[in-house]
Image (cartoon, rainbow, N blue to C red):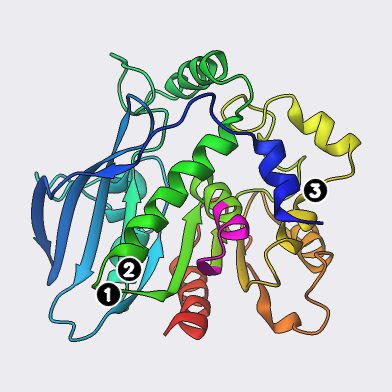
């Protein structure tokens, strides 16, 4: 099975655009790290805020990790411009954690915040349905997961083009929604060398893959065609992947990973950390996941 089969299923937009990254809009320093905020064109008339964090005083290009999520401040655990803490994301600030380990990291607003104007609060989950319905109306041959994957790949473009980053050592990491985005972009983008995904529900029945902002009713067609996420993982070329399983993922997720073709001769490229402590990974589980990234990128 080829990646093109999955690319055909996730679809593509009805129009085209030329991605464009603005000059630095703002900068910040955070515990010895330099942060930069950009705007990136991610549609014919839309932009996503992009935040990058670099370890200071690096003498040579460092490895990079794409960290997709709802919005970048959540992956810092704070608003770096106001100093406001975001306790709802305490403990899972992957951007900060990985910058401390020597990585250049990048994250952006997801499309529920960028696709259509809205007066609703950023945390209002109904924004997802609103944006996904507008996306489907404008681009009937494009899925929500296709949009999420495309926007994530744009972040890989930025890292790969930055001279401060070693483009041959790029990984991707995400939790929950970010785990879904990391899994799809990681499997479909050859520039990504290793995937770390936390509790995203790899089996169709484990989480909300049928929501319109992911696949919608296309899941039924995928199942009828005999496609599951072991097939998608098999398209990655036996790319190293670590899954942190807590609530939605479990040992049946591990069975699906092991069923992916291509790993028969390199089973060490697959790892599960089944902490079984709820949806949010504890610090020791995250540490195992980060060590897995280190193994393949450092």
Residue occupying the point 70% across, 70% down: 237
Q: CA distance from mark 2 to mark 3?
A: 32 Å
Local SS, label 1: helix
Q: Nearer the viewer, mark 1 or mark 3?
A: 3
12 lies left or right of 156: right
> Which contiguous range is marked in magenta?
185-194
Quadrant that contains the C terminus = bottom left
Which comes sooner in the sequence, label 2 or label 3? 2
| x and y percentages locating residue 142 in the rendered image | 60, 28
Task: Say if the magenta span includes residue 82.
Answer: no
Which comes sooner in the sequence, label 1 or label 3? 1
Q: Are marks 1 and 2 in contact (CB under 8 Å)?
A: yes
Task: Say if the magenta span includes residue 192.
Answer: yes
55 lies left or right of 183: left
On the image, numbered disc 1 is attached to which residue? Answer: 100
Q: Nearer the viewer, residue 287 or 160?
A: 160
């Amino acid at each position: 099975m080829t990646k093109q089969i999955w690319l055909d299923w996730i679809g593509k937009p009805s129009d085209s655009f030329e991605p464009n990254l603005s000059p630095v809009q703002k900068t910040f320093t955070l515990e010895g790290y330099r942060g930069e905020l950009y705007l990136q064109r991610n549609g014919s008339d839309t932009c996503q805020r992009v935040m990058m964090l670099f370890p200071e005083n690096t003498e040579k290009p460092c490895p990079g990790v794409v960290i997709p999520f709802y919005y970048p401040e959540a992956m810092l655990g704070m608003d770096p411009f106001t100093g406001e803490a975001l306790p709802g994301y305490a403990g899972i600030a992957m951007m900060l954690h990985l910058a401390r380990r020597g990585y250049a990291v990048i994250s952006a607003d997801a499309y529920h915040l960028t696709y259509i104007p809205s007066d609703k609060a950023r945390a209002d989950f109904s924004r997802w349905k609103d944006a996904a319905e507008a996306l489907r109306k404008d681009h009937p041959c494009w899925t929500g997961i296709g949009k999420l994957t495309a926007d994530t790949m744009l972040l890989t473009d930025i890292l790969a083009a930055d001279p401060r980053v070693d483009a041959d050592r790029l990984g991707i990491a995400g939790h929950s929604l970010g785990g879904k985005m990391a899994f799809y972009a990681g499997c479909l983008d050859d520039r990504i060398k290793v995937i770390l995904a936390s509790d995203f529900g790899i089996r169709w029945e484990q989480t909300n893959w049928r929501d319109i902002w992911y696949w919608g009713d296309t899941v039924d067609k995928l199942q009828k065609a005999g496609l599951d996420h072991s097939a998608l993982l098999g398209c990655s070329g036996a790319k190293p992947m670590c899954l942190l399983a807590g609530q939605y993922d479990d040992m049946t997720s591990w069975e699906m990973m092991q069923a992916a073709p291509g790993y028969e001769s390199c089973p060490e490229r697959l790892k599960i950390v089944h902490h079984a402590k709820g949806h949010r990974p504890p610090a020791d589980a995250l540490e195992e996941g980060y060590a897995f990234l280190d193994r393949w990128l450092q």
